[in-house]
Image: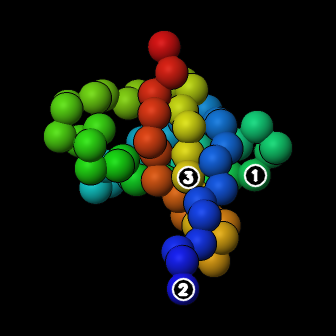
Amino acid sequence: MAKEEAILVQGKVTQALANTQFRVRLDNGHEVIAHIAGRMRKNFIRIVPGDRVKVELSPYDLTKGRITFRER
């Protein structure tokens, strides 16, 4: 069986939490907790509250996600 496709959404970081996790308000109004993808952590990409980000959500749990891109 193939892996389930991730749901790509955009949002704005509202709060920085512990362990490189962030509270993100999505464009549709929902709030999720997201962690930084490994490639972003490896390249030392900093994320601060107020940044626009792209988040991948799992179809199994829509309250948690992974930040994959920080927009300028």
Q: Mark 3 falls on what kind of element?
A: strand
Disc 1 designates what residue? Answer: 30
Quadrant of the rendered image containing residue 53 = top right
Q: Which quadrant, please, contains the N terminus?
A: bottom right
Disc 2 designates what residue? Answer: 1
- The answer to whether residue 17 of the structure is visible from this angle is no
56 and 63: which is toward the camera: 56
Which of disc 2 and disc 3 is earlier in sequence?
2
* Residue that sits furthest to the right in the current view: 28
For the rendered model, the colour scheme is rainbow
Label 3 vs label 2, nearer the camera: 2
Compared to residue 13, the image places residue 61 above or below, namely: below
Residue type at tag 1: His
Q: What residue is shown at x 19% (from left), y 32% (from top)? A: 43
* Residue that sits furthest to the bottom in the current view: 1
Label of residue 56 in the image:
3
Which of disc 3 and disc 1 is earlier in sequence?
1
Compared to residue 70, the image places residue 22 above or below, namely: below
